[in-house]
Amino acid sequence: MKYIIMITIVIGLALADFITGIIKAYIKQDVSSKMMRMGGLHKVMEIVVMLVAIGLEIGIGMLGQYYNEPRLAEITGLFASGAVFAYIVCMEIVSILENYLESD
């Protein structure tokens, strides 16, 4: 369930950033399909990176069980996906705020 919550938050923030970017471009009369396409592709890449980090956490956990070191694997996997999640969340929030501030 935590993975669904993590990916939902990342997707929600990516959508909010994309939408605020479109609004900012519209206000500044600088709407460009190329920029929107590139922004959309960057958002897809962020989602893929988050999915890879979640897969890494699951895989490391399974590897830890195989080698009878489940606690160490749990900590390592949690750090991997947690760090990626925190980075993406911070990056998206900053980008949303930048879009808001630059739209004046």
Image (tube, rainbow, N blue to C red):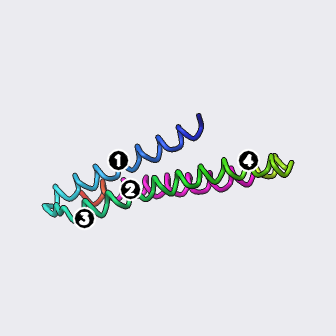
Disc 3, SS = helix
Check whether the beta carbons of the residues at disc 3 and disc 2 lie within 8 A of each other: no
Which amino acid type is marked by label 4? Met
Q: What amino acid type should be assigned to the residue bearing mark 1? A: Leu
Q: Do the residues labelled 2 and 1 touch (CB within 8 Å)?
A: yes
Distance between the alpha carbons at the discs numbered 3 and 2: 12 Å
CA distance separating discs 4 and 2? 29 Å
- Tell me which numbered mark, 2 or 1, is placed earlier along the sequence: 1
SS assignment at label 4: helix
Q: Which mark is residue 15?
A: 1
Closer to the chain start, of discs 1 and 3, is 1
Q: Tell me the residue at 13%/61% (across/down).
A: 29
Question: Pointers 4 and 2 in contact (CB under 8 A)?
Answer: no
Please report the residue visible at 59 percent of the width from the left and 34 percent of the height from the top. 1
Distance of label 1 from label 3 (alpha carbons): 15 Å
The amino acid type, in three-letter code, at marker 2 is: Lys
Instruction: Write down the residue under mark 3.
Output: 35
What x and y, as percent, mark residue 30?
Answer: 16, 63
Q: Label 3: how many residues lie within 10 Å, few (<14), some (14-19) or many (20+)?
A: some
Magenta span: 74-98
From the top left corner, tell me how far across and down residue 69 is, in percent.
85, 50
Residue at image mark 4: 62
Give the spatial CA distance, label 4 vs label 1: 32 Å
Q: Residue furthest left?
A: 29
Which of the image's four quarters has the C terminus? bottom left
Q: Which residue is more in the foreground, 103 or 31?
A: 31
Question: Is tag 3's residue or tag 4's residue first in the polypeptide sequence?
Answer: 3
| Pointer 2 residue | 43
Residue situated in front as seen by the camera: 38 or 94: 38
